[in-house]
Image (cartoon, helix red, strand yellow):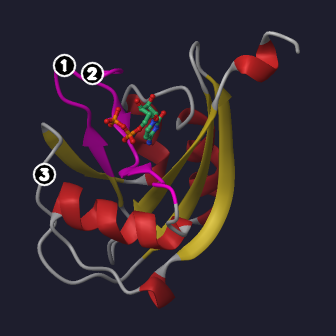
Amino acid sequence: MSEASAVPTVLVVAVALIDPDGRVLIARRPEGKQLAGMWEFPGGKVEPGERPEQALIRELKEELGIDVNEACLAPFVFASHAYENFHLLMPLYLCRRWSGVVTAKEHDGLAWVKPSKLSDYPMPPADEPLIAWLRDLL
Ligand code: CDP
């Protein structure tokens, strides 16, 4: 077995919440976490037995306090990045409709940002390539 195949693959789902002005929500990872201070697309790990969409709905409730209907989640593009200890696979969904007020429950900052300005924010290496996709789309 090669060393590369010993690195686990982790499936994380993420979302670009898009507001009526075409701005996208990013959230800052808090102190004490890996990649602290980086601005990420919200989301999290898919638990065993969960479908990706279910996982994202759960994470959005836990992290941002909002409710999302599965029909409002449009799968968009896959990010893939080899971190030191694991290989991240991360589909990004688009979502324009949710209920509740977006609140930072697990992050230490939230920002609604035009896609053309996303590159001003330091992001995890897995998230960075998604910026260009969003710029082209929105
Ligand atoms: O936040 P936490 O580290 O507890 O776990 P997570 O949100 O389930 O994400 C697992 C890992 O995926 C993070 O530690 C990051 O390395 C990575 N990640 C990322 O690169 N970009 C994201 N938008 C979300 C997570």
Residue type marked 1: Gly
Q: Residue at x 11, y 72 (%)?
A: 101
Using the numbered discs, state the Cα–Cα distance from disc 2 to disc 1 in whole angstroms.
7 Å
- Where does label 1 land, which residue? 32
Magenta run includes residue 33: yes
For disc 2, does the CB lie below 8 Å from ligand 1? no
| 120 drawn magenta | no
Q: Quadrant of ligand 1?
A: top left
Whether tag 2 and tag 1 are in contact, CB under 8 A, the answer is yes
Q: Is residue 30 left or right of residue 40?
A: left
The quadrant in which the C terminus is found is: bottom right
Q: In this view of the protein, can residue 64 be seen by the observer? A: yes
Please give the label number shown on residue 104.
3
Going from N to C along the chain, the mark reached first, 1 or 3, is 1
Q: What segment carries the magenta color?
A: 26-48
- Which residue position is annotated with label 2? 36
Cβ atoms at labels 1 and 3 below 8 Å apart: no
Gap in angstroms between the C-alphas marked 1 and 3: 16 Å
Q: Secondary structure at mark 1?
A: loop
In this view, 127 is above or below 34: below
Distance (Cα) linking label 3 and label 2: 15 Å
- Determine the residue positioned at 45% across, 54% down: 47
For label 2, count other residues whose C-alpha is less than 10 Å away and answer few (under 14), some (14-19) or many (20+): some
Q: Position of residue 132 (x, y in %)?
A: 63, 45
